[in-house]
Every structure is written in structure tokens, then in C-alpha cells.
Image (cartoon, rainbow, N blue to C red):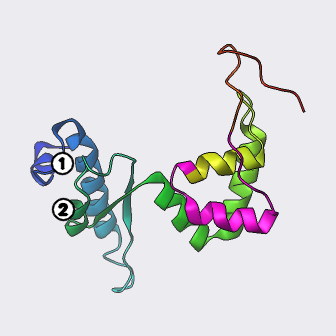
Amino acid sequence: MSSVDFTNVPEKVDEKDRHVAAAALVLRHSADEATEDDEPALVYDVLLVTDNVVDLAKGPMRKLGVRVITSGAFLDEVYAAEPDAAERAIQQAVKDLKNPPYTVAELLFALKAGGAKELVTGLSTRWAVIPTKHDHPAKGKGREPTKG
């Protein structure tokens, strides 16, 4: 990135987050250049996924072609676009999470708390699972996870 990239960052972006916004704008510019030879109507979204939406000036960044969205909103969009792929990803996450382990119900609860309401509603219905709060701390931090 050059200093020119930083001059395009909206003033409303928090000083500590300007580098993140500048990187997203560089990606926007690169995506536009890469699609010049593609179909004229083809436009790629550039998403900046963060739970720090306020400091990254959602509105001004949108005007520059970068959508600033929360992680929950991103997961909901993935689920809406590719429900089977999202389902496989959540199933894999449950298998991969070991310290501490999560059940499907616990992971769905955490995802809902993180804002992925559509994903959780859809998968809860599909799997007939009620999201349940995760109640055991990581190993070495309090009591050991329960077995079974």
C-alpha cells in the first residue's frame, strides 16, 4: 500500500483502523481492474467483515464500494447463498473445536449471540436442535470440560 491508498480512506474511519480500511479500498481497486475484461455487468462485492462496524465508517466506506458488515451478517449471507456449504462448515467446526469442545447446540448458541440469526434459525430448524449456552471453560481455565 502507498500513502495514496490512505488518502482515500474516509475521515470518519477511526485512526487506529485506517490501515484496515485502506487495505479494503486497495482490494476494491484491484477487483475493479481485474474485471475490466469480464462481462460489463459483472461486479464483485468487496466485504470488510468486522464486529467493529462503527469505527470503520460503514456508510462512507459503502460509497467507495466496500461493504462493512459484522461477522454474524456475513455468516447469514453465506447461509442464504450456499446453505449446504454453510451446514457442512458448521458440522466441521463442531468436529474441530476441541479446547473446549462444543456440541452443535452450543455452537449454534454462540453463533446466534454473534449475530448469525438467520443461519442459526435455519440450521436449528433443519437439524431440530435448540441452541444451548456453552457451560464449560477451556482446559486449564477452571474445571475440565464434562465428558459425554
Residue plotted at (39% across, 71% down): 44
**In the displayed structure, does residue 73 sit left or right of residue 112?**
left
Circle 2 residue: 60
Residue plotted at (18% across, 62% down): 60
Circles 2 and 1, Cβ within 8 Å, touching? The answer is yes
**In the displayed structure, does residue 44 sit left or right of residue 94?**
left
Q: In the image, residue 86 lies at what x, y percent?
A: 66, 61
Question: How far is disc 2 from disc 1 in space, using C-alphas?
Answer: 9 Å
State yes or no: residue 115 in magenta: yes
State yes or no: residue 57 in magenta: no
Residue plotted at (77% across, 68% down): 126
Please report the bounds of the magenta region as a residue range.
113-133
56, 9: nearer the viewer: 56
Label 2 sits on a secondary structure element that is helix
> Are there few (<14), some (14-19), or many (20+) residues within 10 Å of tag 1?
many
**Quadrant in the picture for the N terminus:** top left
Label 1 sits on a secondary structure element that is loop
Residue plotted at (14% across, 51% down): 12
Q: Amino acid at mark 2?
A: Pro
**Quadrant in the picture for the C terminus:** top right
